[in-house]
Image (tube, rainbow, N blue to C red):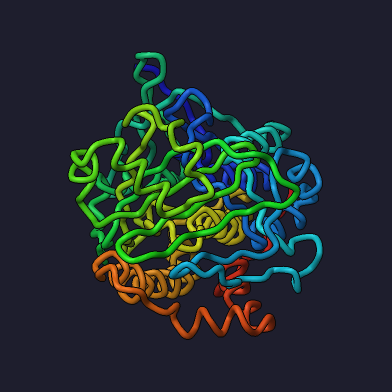
Amino acid sequence: MTGHESDLCIVGGGPAGMVAGLLFARAGVKTTVLEKHGDFLRDFRGDTVHPSTLRIFSELGLLDALLARPHDKVQSAGGIIAGRYLKLVDFSSFDPRWNFIAMMPQWEFLDFVADAARRYPQFSLLMGTEANGLCIEGGRVTGLTYRQNSKESVLSTRLVIAADGRSSQLREQSGFAVRSFGAPMDVFWFRIPKRCGTENETTGVFAARRIMAMIDRGDYWQCAYIFPKGQADAVRQRGLETFKAEIASLAPRVAADVDAIESWEDVKLLRVELDRLERWHRAGLLVIGDAAHAMTPLGGVGINLAVQDAVAAANILAGPMARGENVDRLLAKVQARRMLPVRVYQAMQYAGQKRIISRLLSRDETPFEPPRTARALNRFAWLRRFPALMMGFGIRPEHVRSPKA
């Protein structure tokens, strides 16, 4: 088994891991990112780059280059609720540099961040490399073992950042307790072709017993069909034709194209979770992003919270690490900085699950009126700025404070 050394090892090449890798390497910290897949090309992942993230890249001087990648701009959004289209969110009052959500395939975003990070000699990205376990000496994490091309290796490091997602193996090995809030739904993701339009038409459809999000990807809809938790097999057992008929009935604008779903292989299951760690750190180890707090798809905030975690971690840790200091005592500050926004967002998502999702999925087919809040948002344009502010920036948004070597 071969051995290597690095100041920092980041496990997971998702939004949190890649942005952290860029910021720490930019500060002069020798940084190694491990990503278990051979590339970033995986569909049905979070693709909403919110204003908070766009502002961070502006502060790095990278916004124009990022937006040169394929994307659509969404300045406002709404949903079809009980058969009526209602306007719900409007970002247009923000700074013109980030007064929209950039609908960008996640592989484009991650590839861009990787290219930006590679400009720093302190950065190394190992693709097709999976972390196997933590190395612990005297109660402190001192590195990890990993496998690349069937070869086992050891990476010794001053700090490990686990950013390996909601199914994180490292957070399990660390022994951290997970607090789960449950989720009343799971999601089927699939594609349906569409004709390109001049404006992005992303929307949601909310009806009795059925909910679907429709993300406009230009020449196709990325659809999220929401159904009661644990009922995936029951939906499949009703048959593919019944499933397609339900989609066509729920969203008539795609009815002519639902036959693009040729088999259940075209329909991917996402098991929705809402949970968080009560403790994110131990000596030599910090957990961030989905590994620290799994979010539901509501509001598309998960990717942006993960990026904010990465920025906060670099703001607090990168300078001291670049100076050669031990940062174990500072790890708690990262959690303290980020726990408030996580709690607020998760409380909002939990309330949305209980008051909207659960009630819709369990109600009968009798006609109903859209909620008063939704009707008020549709009627008063100025009200739509408030959900935009929470979605776009939220509580305690981060700015880049980490040094540039």
Is residue 208 visible to the viewer in this orientation of the structure? yes
Tally of numbered tags? 0
364 is higher (above) or lower (below) than 215: below
Residue 56 image position (x, y, % from top left): 69, 57
Hey, which quadrant is residue 263 in on the image? top left
Q: Can residue 326 be seen by looking at this rendering? A: no
Q: Where 247 sits versus 95, above or below?
A: above
Residue 200: percent from left, percent from top = 67, 52
In the image shown, does 356 or 109 lie closer to the viewer? Answer: 356
Nearest the camera: 204 or 2? 204
- x 63%, y 49%: residue: 103
The location of residue 245, given as percent across then percent down, is 35, 44
Nearer to us in this view, 110 or 2: 110
Q: Which residue does the image show at 58% across and 35% down from the upper left?
A: 107
The N terminus: image quadrant: top left
Which residue corresponds to the image point at 76% horizontal and 57% vertical from the top-left?
A: 59
With 392 as the anchor, is 237 left or right in this view? left
Q: Please, is residue 386 above or below residue 11 in the view?
A: below
Q: Residue furthest top?
A: 150
Left of 68 or right of it: where is 84?
left
Observer-nearest of 191 and 92: 191
Q: Position of residue 231 (x, y in %)?
A: 20, 50
Residue at (39, 69) in percent of width and height: 349
